[in-house]
Amino acid sequence: MEEGKSTVRAVDRALDILLCFTLRTDWAMTEIAEHVGLHKSTVHRMLATLEEKGFIERDQSTDRYHLGLRVWELSANLSGSDDQATIWLPEMVRLRDQLGETVSIYVRDGSERIRIQAVQSNQPVRRVAPIGIRLPLYAGASSKVLIAYSKEAVQASILESPEWPSSIDMQQYRLQLQEVTSQGYATSFEEREAGAAALSSPIFDRAGGLAAALSVSGPASRMTLETMREYAPVMMEAAKRMGTMSK
């Protein structure tokens, strides 16, 4: 009986740790221990187990924890009425049909972005966007949006990370982020993949916080700067409508 109670107590504590991430995206171990009222050694053991199972990931550069991909795999089985990515899907299909290119949704997870939803272009030559893929934050239009609209402290921690390639001019990149917030969208040309271009804008939740980045991508031969400027108002309007659907 005592063993059963101990097991339930361990599950309860693990869930308390996971629920910390409903308050903010990343935590230090000591912060979690203080928040849930547990000894640091206990929290350390539980974080190690959650990390092993993929529910938690640790940023090696900052020694802070954030949710892992396993959480998104679980969310893929939510009912349509509860799954935010599914709720956005009809608007994404509408945007794909309007612009003719692949439409994706990205969220930030630590120093990476994850594609949580996608609608493929119907054109013979198109960008193929597999759902669930992790991509670096240092390249791509959606990455710029996710960084530009992050809270100041979060943005600083991202930009100061040693994971950034030395080839990137950080002063120039910061100017790009300012341009993103000024015009309301970001563009990229072959930053991550040769022959590909993308356009992205933020989706804000009802409280005004950044919920995700909406992206339209395709071959650079079709997605020219002039074309993307024409697409931008259409995409931003779609992102605005999707924001009204946010939880």
Image: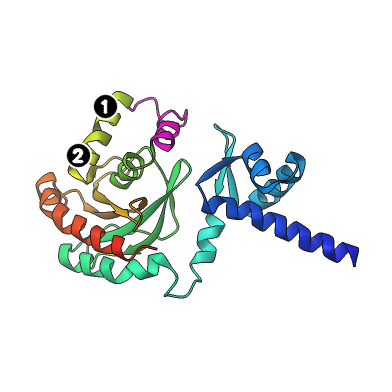
Q: Left or right: where does residue 124 sit relative to residue 9?
A: left
Indicate the secondary structure of the residue bearing disc 1.
Answer: helix
Callout 2: SS? helix
In x, y percent, where is residue 216? 24, 55
- The quadrant of the image that shows the C terminus is bottom left
Q: What span is colored magenta in the figure?
A: 152-168
Is residue 89 visible to us here? yes
**Above or below for 9 versus 83:** above
Q: Dot 2: few (<14), some (14–19), or many (≥20) neighbours within 10 Å?
A: few
Circle 1 Cα neighbour tier, 10 Å, few/some/many (<14 / 14–19 / ≥20): few
Q: Which mark is residue 102?
A: none
Q: Is residue 234 above or below residue 161?
A: below
First in sequence, mark 2 or 1: give its number. 1
Number of numbered discs overlaid on the protein picture: 2
The dot on residue 182 is 2
Instruction: Tell me residue 13's x, y (percent).
Output: 71, 55
- Residue behind mark 1: 172
Three-letter amino acid code at disc 2?
A: Ser
Residue type at mark 1: give it.
Gln
Residue 161 covered by magenta stretch: yes
Q: Position of residue 232 (x, y in %)?
A: 16, 52
**Viewport quadrant of the N terminus:** bottom right
Instruction: Residue 68: tell me if it is visible.
Output: no
Judging depth in this view, the residue of 183 and 122 nearest the camera is 183
The residue located at (13%, 45%) in the rendering is 225
